[in-house]
Image (cartoon, rainbow, N blue to C red):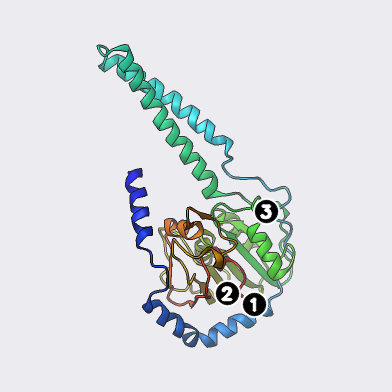
Amino acid sequence: MLLLCIFGFVLLASRVPQETPPSEQAWMATITEQDNAEATEIHDIILNFRPVVIGDPITGAEYRYFPKSACWTCFGLTAIVCAAASWFMMKKRHRRASCKKQTAVIVSCTILPACLAYAMGYAASYYFGGPYNYENYAVPTEACDVLIWFSGSDDGAYFMDNYARSIREFGYDRAALFNFRDMTQALQFAEKLPDGCRIIVRGHSMGAAAAAHFCQKCNREILMLDTRDSTSWFNHLKSKPSNVIHWRNVLPSEPFLRTPESRHMDTFYFCGFNMANVFRWLGGPWGLRDGAVNLMPSACDHHDVGEAID
């Protein structure tokens, strides 16, 4: 199965076009025309949005939900269980096999699953990322502007990417940052907000999907949902949630697995592959959304659309 996945990835990458196809070029040429009025209104909202100070999300936060050291625990436990199971199987069903053959079977039935468990634990450590320090957050007592911001996979207080983005756009500690898996904490925070607050909800990648699902579950009016290239394989939003006034959906104009490195200086490349777009493809991109102002800034990949565009 792993070999088939690798082969499929290589085959797909070899067929990825290097330039935007004509159909997308035509759509890009008309999209700003199509949504110009609402796009202008959204731009004005962002320029006049003054989110209140929520608190420091970084200091005192845990590193990751699944530390890398846990990978060795997965490896050891799996090795012990598989070794015992394979030894029992050999003694019960293959007692006449040579000692050399029995040892080879036990070793192979132990090492391979243990290595797979280690790889899965390692991947989980990156996928789930880490939390922010929600205990540092202070809920405002009066109506004000509130920014709720979801980070994607391999992100959190340790990476500080979204923290830096929020600082550049709105100032220090003015975003209630949440890991994409911390939906409960985000909803509890929103429930405590006083009436009359103007709320913007933003997220990138898995965080954008979490932001959209948050709006679905939240019983507050959301001034704007700002999704940056949402990714998830399931539960794609088919239309704008009824409690959302404006929805801006920012997509990459260069979503290809191979893109010119010179245009994406902050993106990590491996063997010529744009890894931000690789993870986008693996994560299941949502693409265009009905009810949203769909924007596609030029020369942007999956990583770039997470940056501020105002």
Q: Which of the numbered marks, if any, corresponds to residue 224?
A: 2
Q: Quadrant of the N terminus?
A: top left
The circle on residue 80 is none
The circle on residue 134 is: 3
Amino acid type at image mark 1: Ile
36 on left or right of 61: left
- Residue at point 73% right, 57% down? 56
Dot 3 surroundings within 10 Å: few (below 14), some, or many (20 or more)? many
* Distance (Cα) linking label 3 and label 1: 25 Å
**Is residue 96 rendered to the left or right of residue 23?**
left
Going 25% across and 17% down the picture, which residue do you hit?
Answer: 93
Q: Nearer the viewer, residue 30 or 238?
A: 30
Q: Which quadrant does the C terminus fall into?
A: bottom right
Label 2: which secondary element? strand
Can you identify the residue that label 1 sits on?
46
Is 252 placed above or below 138 here? below
Pinpoint residue 150: horizontal percent, then vertical percent.
Answer: 58, 60
Q: Nearer the N terminus, badge 2 or badge 3?
A: 3
